[in-house]
Amino acid sequence: MELLEKRIISDGSILPGNVIKVGSFLNHQIDVKLLMEMGKEVKRLYEGENITKILTVEASGIAVATAFAAVMGTMVVFAKKHGTSNISGDVISCRTHSYTHNTDYNMVVEKQYLTDRDRILIVDDFLANGQALCSLIDIVTRSGAQLVGCAVAIEKGFQHGGDKLREKGIRVESLAIIDSIENGVIRFRR
Ligand code: 5GP
């Protein structure tokens, strides 16, 4: 998506370890107008798929998922990252690894929010090695809901998480795919 690619180039920066900082528009300060435009594109891509709910993971997935849900007219469920006291009843949890913090944590969703009548779109801000999406996919599978696909704002194609999921037959739509970063120059997949 050209609008997003241009914004990554103009406002993004590269941190050590090829971590891309987009705090000025995506995951610290939030450009809601941009996110709504991204939501329109995701709605177009998944037209006719009758998505009933968007599933994401806290924290930075929530803003993206909420904007997409506002455009698509669905609810949002977000996996919580730690066993908090406001989680009750039956839960589905999945151990996962945080790319940015290099730690393991549990993703937890209350079972009542994902039912076998739901058709789920998984949304996240970034896709790198694919750990976060794999855990969310595992949660959807175990809930009995149907996974329609995934929609990601920025995929780091050079880490191949997205390609591995596509090879497994999972639909993954990314609005910008970065294929390489060399000497600070970002190249997008065409
Ligand atoms: P994965 O699990 O696919 O390896 O990494 C995806 C998760 O790590 C996302 O939920 C995202 O929050 C975080 N992440 C991965 N790479 C980056 C990055 O380059 N920049 C930022 N801001 N977050 C990232």
Image (cartoon, grey):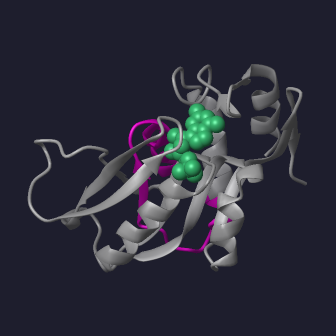
Q: Nearer the viewer, residue 160 or 63?
A: 160
Residue lying at 71% horizontally and 58% vertically, measured from the top left: 160
Q: Is residue 96 left or right of residue 48?
A: left
| On-image quarter of the C terminus | bottom right
Residue lying at 89% horizontally and 27% vertically, measured from the top left: 183
Q: Is residue 50 magenta?
A: yes
Q: Nearer the viewer, residue 106 or 8?
A: 106
Residue lying at 49% horizontally and 64% vertically, measured from the top left: 134
Q: Is residue 96 magenta?
A: no
Q: Is residue 170 above or below residue 127?
A: below
**Quarter-of-image position of residue 120:** bottom left
Q: Is residue 65 left or right of residue 6?
A: left
Specify start and end residues of the magenta stretch as a single range. Answer: 43-71
Residue 147 location (% of width, % of height): 47, 74
Ligand 1's image quarter is top right
Residue 56 location (% of width, % of height): 43, 52
Q: Is residue 28 above or below residue 142?
A: above
Residue 38 location (% of width, % of height): 65, 44
Residue 45 location (% of width, % of height): 68, 63
Q: Is residue 82 above or below residue 164?
A: above
Q: Nearer the viewer, residue 110 or 16?
A: 16
Q: Is residue 45 above or below residue 76?
A: below
